[in-house]
Amino acid sequence: MSVNTDTSTAFTQAQHDTFNTTMQEENIIVAANRTELYLPLLKEKRVAVVANQTSVIFKNIETPHDLSYTHIVDSLLHLNINIKNVFAPEHGFRGTADAGELVKDGMDTKTGLPVYSLHGKHKKPTASHLKDVDILVFDIQDVGVRFYTYISTLHYIMEACAEQNIPLLILDRPNPNGNYIDGPVLEKKHSSFLGMHPIPLIHGMTIGEYAKMINGEAWLTNGKTCDITIIEMKNYKHDSTYSLPIRPSPNLPNDQSIVLYPSLGLFEGTNINAGRGTEFQFQRFGAPFLDKNHFKFSYTPVANFGSKYPKHQNETCYGVDLSEVKVERSFTLKYVIDAFNHALDKSKVFNTSNFTTHAGTEKLQQQIESGLTEDEIKATWKDDIDAYKKMRRNYLIYN
């Protein structure tokens, strides 16, 4: 199958070119492409796959401008692997559902395989889902932010496998925000599907490394351990740059959005729009109640792909456009602080419970409302970050 040009999943040609350059320079080979390492583990087994639109095998990664790929489910079927069913995370198997939207079970029209949603009635596979399964394969592209729910799905997959004594094969992929660690560490009382474990907002791990940490820190129910095998990437380091060729979710359309997502994602817990309902998701923010004398940029969110009901739909929002700004792979609070400080009615900014769920702590909202600077706020979580980094070293696979 040639590269998918459907705008629901594919990036623009310019971003494809960036991806090709990155892949050629660093020659990062994702685990899915290392079939010689994992096909022997799947032969003669009944297999289930946890996958979405990013779960692909690239055909010619060393050939410039060739982004041909096949979906891993299609490839495994072609190789006569006995796939029994597919499990789909948030946004669904083909990656078209809105953020937070419940996804129903169904059937994949291309393969005829049953698809069980892990973002609907169930967050965790049931015993009946797994009764004819010998091994699970997990292959999903993450972006390295705690409230991006694919790592919560990983937790529940590991828990189900541990309970049913089924091994889990993890095919690792790069973390595009894997070069740094920042943000408040989640407090246990604020655990949710948007953050299940005491890790910073930007955790600096790949899916494989995070799975090792879940096991090693006994975070599964009753301290159970999942039997995991991790197929590692080749030539990946945590400071590697990696341009994703396929949208990891509907509202992360390009590299700019993925780099800004750790910072602008906090707006998801406020009443401020973060670009949903435009073609510049997580590259702008705004609201009708922000001061238009301070914020000269304006836009109007409308219902579109990935956002059926965006915040402030059909209303003029005043804010900031970051789509053309050069940004570093780092986390900043300056956008949230600026929006709060220049809101005409500050009581409208925070959706308190939702912001706390995203931040993982009540303290961040309190600190912003009390007027602390970004440096002062970040100083309060330094000790927690240092302790986390020490723990994280035990589970690293890549330098």
Image: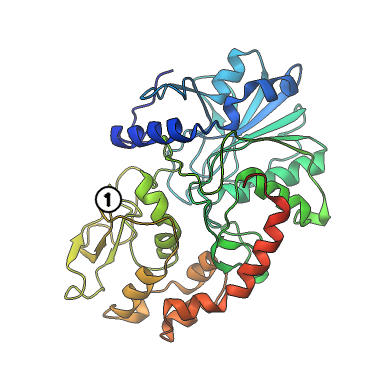
Q: Residues within 10 Å of mark 1 (few under 14, many from 20)?
A: many
Left or right, 29 with respect to 343, comes to right
Looking at this rendering, what residue extends furthest in the bottom direction?
370
Q: Is residue 110 visible?
A: yes
Q: Where is residue 256 in the image (x, y as percent from the top left)?
A: 35, 49
Tell which of 97 and 169 is nearer to you: 169
Left or right, 272 with respect to 236, comes to left
Tell which of 300 and 337 is nearer to you: 337
Label 1 secondary element: loop
Left or right, 312 with respect to 333, comes to left
Tell which of 79 and 97 is nearer to you: 79
Mark 1: amino acid: Thr
Q: Which residue is drawn at 62% across and 13% down?
A: 79
Q: Where is residue 350 in the image (x, y as percent from the top left)?
A: 41, 74
Q: Is residue 81 placed above or below 146 in the rendered structure?
A: above
Q: Is residue 4 placed above or below 370 in the rendered structure?
A: above
Q: Which residue is drawn at 59% across and 23% down?
A: 113
Which residue carries the number 1 mark? 278
Q: Can residue 307 be seen in this view?
A: no
